[in-house]
Amino acid sequence: MRTSVTKRGQTVIPAAIRKRDHIHEGDQIAWLDDCMTTRVVATAADPIHALHGQGKGERLVERLLATRQADRNDEHWALCARYSGRLHIDRG
């Protein structure tokens, strides 16, 4: 889709895109420029509210806790391996 830019630098987001991407009055548009291309990304006026309910049924808390436990186990065994060769007991 193509739109025109007014002499004041304004343009219109086509209705089909506004409906598809749920862009409403008050939402903000971010312009991402990497010197090669410019992308336009819609951001919700309240991003926290926009994400409400997105993780339903994903068991995110359980996955987070399991990941944290695995990280703790990995750290424990890494420390054990690191220091196991450094312990010296003088027996004599």
Image: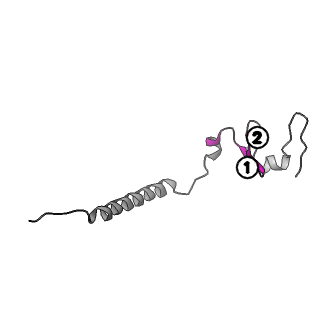
* 35 inside magenta stretch: yes
Residue on which the image places disc 1: 34
In the rendering, at what x and y percent does residue 53 appear?
Answer: 60, 49
Residue in view at x 41 percent, y 61 percent = 70
Q: Could you classify mark 2 by the number of other residues whose Cα lies within 10 Å: few (under 14), some (14-19), or many (20 or more)?
A: few
Nearest the viewer among 71 and 82 is 82
State the separation of the CA atoms marked 1 and 2. 26 Å
Image position of 53 (left or right of 16): left
Nearest the viewer among 30 and 81 is 81
Residue at the far top in the pictured view: 8
Amino acid type of the residue tagged 2 in the rendering: His
Q: Are marks 1 and 2 in contact (CB under 8 Å)?
A: no
Looking at the image, is 57 positioned above or below residue 9? Answer: below
Locate the C terminus and report the quarter of the image it occupies: bottom left
- Single out the mark in the foreground, 1 or 2: 1
Q: Could you classify mark 1 by the number of other residues whose Cα lies within 10 Å: few (under 14), some (14-19), or many (20 or more)?
A: few
In the rendering, at what x and y percent does residue 35 appear?
Answer: 76, 49
Residue on which the image places disc 2: 24
In the rendering, at what x and y percent does residue 83 appear?
Answer: 28, 61
On residue 44, the disc is none
Amino acid type of the residue tagged 1 in the rendering: Asp
The segment highlighted magenta reads: 26-48
Q: Earlier in the sequence, mark 1 or mark 2?
A: 2
Residue in view at x 16 percent, y 63 percent = 89
Image position of 53 (left or right of 86): right
Looking at the image, is 38 positioned above or below residue 9? Answer: below
In the rendering, at what x and y percent does residue 39 appear?
Answer: 76, 49
Residue in view at x 78 percent, y 51 percent = 37
